[in-house]
Amino acid sequence: RKKYFEAEPKKLRVGIQAKGLRKEFSVKVAVKDVTLNVYHGQITVLLGHNGAGKTTFASMLTGLYQPTSGELKVDGTDAIKNPEFSRRRMGLCPQFDVLYDELTCEEHLRLFAVVKNCPPKRVSMEVSHVLEQLGLTFKRRVLSKDLSGGMKRRLSLGMAMINNTKILILDEPTSGLDPEARRGVWDFLLSIRKDRLIMLSTHWMEEADVLGDRIAIMSRGRVVCCGSSIFLKRVYAGGYHLRIAKSEKFDSKYFQQFVRDNLPESKLENETGNEIKFTIAPEDTNKLPDF
């Protein structure tokens, strides 16, 4: 099991600690004894297919679902016995936008600032700050129903982070967005991660690779692997494949020795009459440009 779990970071502060967290419904077990630490100053990605248990796990973190069993701590406090403590510290961006058609961007943010107990004197300043961060200042008086998909997603993110919320739980935050809008959300999340704990779920491997400081892979309700993108590639991937088309005077033995001398961890994968193919280990990939 240790092979699939990278060592925990030592210099970061744990924000969320889940230990043996389990959720049973009448017809199935959605989350099976998940143990996972999520750290401040990082983006932690839950990567898995639809139905893997990502949304159920996120719902337990935010208090929408009561765990069947297990332990959950938020900033060192038991979040199961004291759910209000964790809820005050968290912001949730659900998978689908929950917006009021007849409210503007500014009105949505004002509403959530008040709900999150933002001091009345600070509400206007906080709303303007979030609008600026999200690039929505010029849309502040536009009704939500008139926003593009990307702008709606940004507004949902703003509602989650208003009042300087330090723990953000984002359930597939780029769901349904086109590539340009998705990239905009990525850039924004990367820009704010230093002073926040961000946990997001996705089924896009590219998104996990771009955003994840740590990636936890979920399958059938379990976390089966966890670590950095580089760590996961070392565990699951064989590195690069080097395929060479043979000429008439191709010397196979000489070329194999040449590859071994320059890429010592490489392995001969296959050889036919027309080509020869090697698997290049991850630790040799930095040598490929010179090779």
Image: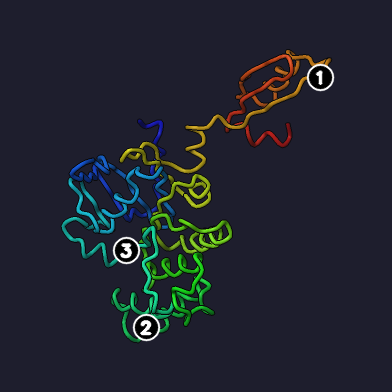
Q: Position of residue 185 (x, y in %)?
A: 51, 61
Residue at 69% across, 26% down: 243
Circle 2 residue: 122
Question: Which is more N-terminal, label 1 or label 2?
Answer: 2
Distance between the Cα atoms at labels 2 and 1?
73 Å
Res 247 label: 1
In the displayed structure, would residue 266 be above or below residue 15?
Answer: above
Residue type beneath disc 1? Ser
Given residues 20 and 111, the one toward you in this image is 111
Q: Is residue 3 visible?
A: yes
* SS label for mark 2: helix
* SS label for mark 1: loop
Given residues 229 and 68, the one toward you in this image is 68
Question: How many dots with numbers?
Answer: 3
Q: Position of residue 136 (x, y in %)?
A: 51, 75
In the displayed structure, would residue 181 be above or below residue 45?
Answer: below
Of tags 1 and 3, the one toward the viewer is: 1
Residue at 36% across, 58% down: 169
Res 90 label: 3
Distance between the Cα atoms at labels 1 and 3?
62 Å
Residue type beneath disc 3? Met
Q: Position of residue 54 (x, y in %)?
A: 35, 48
Q: Is residue 164 visible?
A: no
Residue at 45% across, 78% down: 143
